[in-house]
Amino acid sequence: MVDTTIALGQSSRRRGLLARRLAPHLFTLLFLAAWQAAALVAPSYLLPGPAQVAWRLWLFVTSWRDLGHLGASLYHVAASIAISFVIGSLLALIPYYAPLLRFAIERRVGPFLNSFSAIGWTLLSIMWFGVTSLTVIFAISAVLVPFALINMSAGLANIDRETIEMGGSFTRRRARMFALVIVPSLYPFIFSTLRIMFGVSWKVTLTAELFGGNAGLGYMVNMERQEFDTATIFAAIVLIITFVHGTDHYLLAPLQAKVSRHYAG
């Protein structure tokens, strides 16, 4: 009787695990079916079907011109993340080493940067720099700086004071203390910040390139919008979603989990 109960419990757990694995795929199939049904009713310039978008996506990845726009967007994102992370980290370090400036950074600079919209930064950068890659990078960086500022400030606030005191017993040099004690203590926050910035940057990139770029996926979407080439727009959206989700799920999330486990232990 006991063996039968255990076997039934194991079978039930296996069915539950199988159902959880199949549910996302079933949802995807239902979504594609609904999309195809809607595409049969709507004109192709309003809603292209999945097959049409898939074919355009294949043409995208086999076209050097289209891949060039993807490369431009990758460059904009990478440069913006690097610049904004450095600026945000420096702003977080200022009140850590100069407490008198804490009010200015946390109550003035931080709220200002956090409340200013991406559209506002894009329009300002167009006026200052024209329609160039610098405009796109400036607009994205300005939006990302608050994320680095807030997360790195939280990381600095959570550094173990006993660890700082122990490090101070080995060296009095601030540069050495910063490189060997403070920076390693911030590794979990650094990976978390970069992961958040990576996801947000792609949302801002399309807007910045749409209005102020001369290359990139946002610029490409703007050009195809004028030609009513909706299939290309959908293909670009699918490519961005796939790339961002794949990078986050298979690269950034495992790295962050590994670092978090290491420092949690």
Image (cartoon, rainbow, N blue to C red):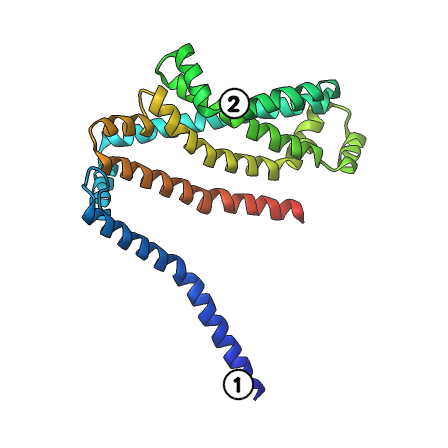
**Percent x, y for residue 4?**
53, 85
Q: Circle 2 — which element?
A: loop
Q: CA distance from mark 2 to mark 1?
A: 63 Å
Res. 90 in view: no
Q: Nearer the viewer, residue 231 or 9?
A: 231
Q: Is residue 175 left or right of residue 55?
A: right
Question: Which structural element holds mark 1?
Answer: helix
Total count of labels: 2
Q: Tell which tag, 2 or 1, sits nearer the viewer.
A: 2
Q: Quadrant of the N terminus?
A: bottom right
Up the image or down, 171 lies above or below 62; here it is above
Residue 206, position as x, y percentages in the image: 37, 29
Disc 1 crowd rating (10 Å Cα; few below 14, some 14-19, many 20+) is: few
Label 2 amino acid? Answer: Phe
State the mark number for residue 128. none
Q: Residue at x 21, y 40 (%)?
A: 56
In the rendered view, tell whether residue 149 sits above or below residue 1: above
Circle nearer the N terminus (2, 1): 1
Q: Is residue 99 left or right of residue 203?
A: right
User: Amino acid type of disc 1?
Assistant: Thr
**Crowd tier of the residue under label 2, counting other residues whose Cα lies within 10 Å: few below 14, some 14–19, many 20 or above:** few
Find the residue positioned furthest to the top. 128
Q: Which residue corresponds to mark 1?
A: 4
Percent x, y of residue 100:
75, 18
Q: Residue 116, which numbered label?
A: 2
Q: Residue 51: image x %, image y %? A: 21, 48
